[in-house]
Image (spheres, helix red, strand yellow):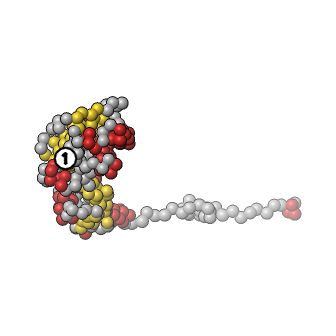
Amino acid sequence: MGIFSKKKKNKTIQKSWQRKETKAYPGAPKKEKPKKGGFFSRFLFWLLLVGFLGICVFLLFFSTFLDISKITIQGNQDISSVEISKVVEKSLEGNYLKYLPKKNFFLASEANIGNAVKNNFNRLEVASIGKKFPDTIVAKVVERKAELAWCSAGVCYFVDGSGLVYGGAAGSEDDLRVGNFLVVVDDSAIPVEIGKTKISPDFIGYVEGANAMMRDDLKIEPVASYHTPGIASQEVSVMTSEGWILKISSEYSIDEAKNIIQTLFEKDLNGETRKNMDYLDLRVKGKVYYKTK
């Protein structure tokens, strides 16, 4: 029977006081112990970050390096750059919210500068306001040109091509005519406000056209200022070098008025007849009136 007996395996009995062995598996992550000093590192990081941001804010908004110190004016002719620069400098005085300087390069407002120039110089149009890093303002302006002189209640003003009354004119209407200005007198004597009152550009063009028609086509010189009963009337009258008054309105275009007058001069109103003429009236569409003395 000993031939068929099974061999018994030797088993090691682990005792309670012995430590149980653990097996390591390659895929299982090992737990790391928390590093010492983590709080201090985070505190230092945030301290440096806040300090860096503070320095950036100071350099960007409070450092004199970025204060506007140069002002360049371009396009002006009769008005000095010094005068315009003073207005720009004044617009940069003071602070936003009591602390942020208006003269800082990044905070300087192009719109505020442009408005300051326009409000102080009616004769100037602001083309553009720009900045040049780190401390320069560049203002490009255009000086208005007088298309005509507008006189009302004994005072004369300059009017630009857009019809804006932009400034007072020194001298009387006679002085302005001697200076080769086209002068229109408003017989209604309505008060004029510089920078606010506007004359219709179409009316200005009509007066200029009538003046050119008389000089170039009819060969008759106007010897006095043009007169109008009011801004809205679209009518003008002027004394001619032949001693009679021409009265016209926008009811007739300049070309229509020229053709009618030239036809009258050829047929009914020759040179001798015109010597005794009081006025020629083309203010009503389809009607032509004239009166002899």
What residue is drawn where x is 36% and y is 30%? 286
* Depth check, front residue: 181 or 232: 181
Outermost residue, bottom side: 65
Instruction: Residue lying at the far front in this picture: please name it.
Output: 272
Task: Residue under label 1, please give it.
Answer: 224
In the picture provided, is 45 more to the left or to the right than 120? Answer: right
Would you identify the image quadrant in which residue 40 lies? bottom left
Pick the quarter of the image with the N terminus: bottom right
Element on which disc 1 rests: loop
Of the pair 205 and 263, the residue shown nearer to us = 263
Name the residue: 76% across, 62% down. 8
Question: Picture coordinates of residue 241 (x, y %)?
Answer: 22, 47
The residue lying toward the viewer, choosing from 120 and 195, is 195
The answer to which quarter of the image holds residue 38 is: bottom left
Task: Decide which of 145, 40 is in the foreground and name it.
Answer: 145
The amino acid on which the numbered mark 1 sits, given as a three-letter code, is: Ala
Where in the figure is residue 191, as x and y percent of width and height?
15, 39
Q: Name the residue at 22% across, 39% down.
A: 276
Identify the residue at image location x=51%, y=62%: 31
Q: Is residue 54 visible?
A: no
Other residues around mark 1 within 10 Å, as few (<14) / some (14–19) / many (≥20): some
Find residue 172 and report its horizontal and vertical position in percent. 13, 50
Q: Give the percent coordinates (x, y) of residue 275.
A: 23, 42
Question: Total number of numbered labels?
Answer: 1
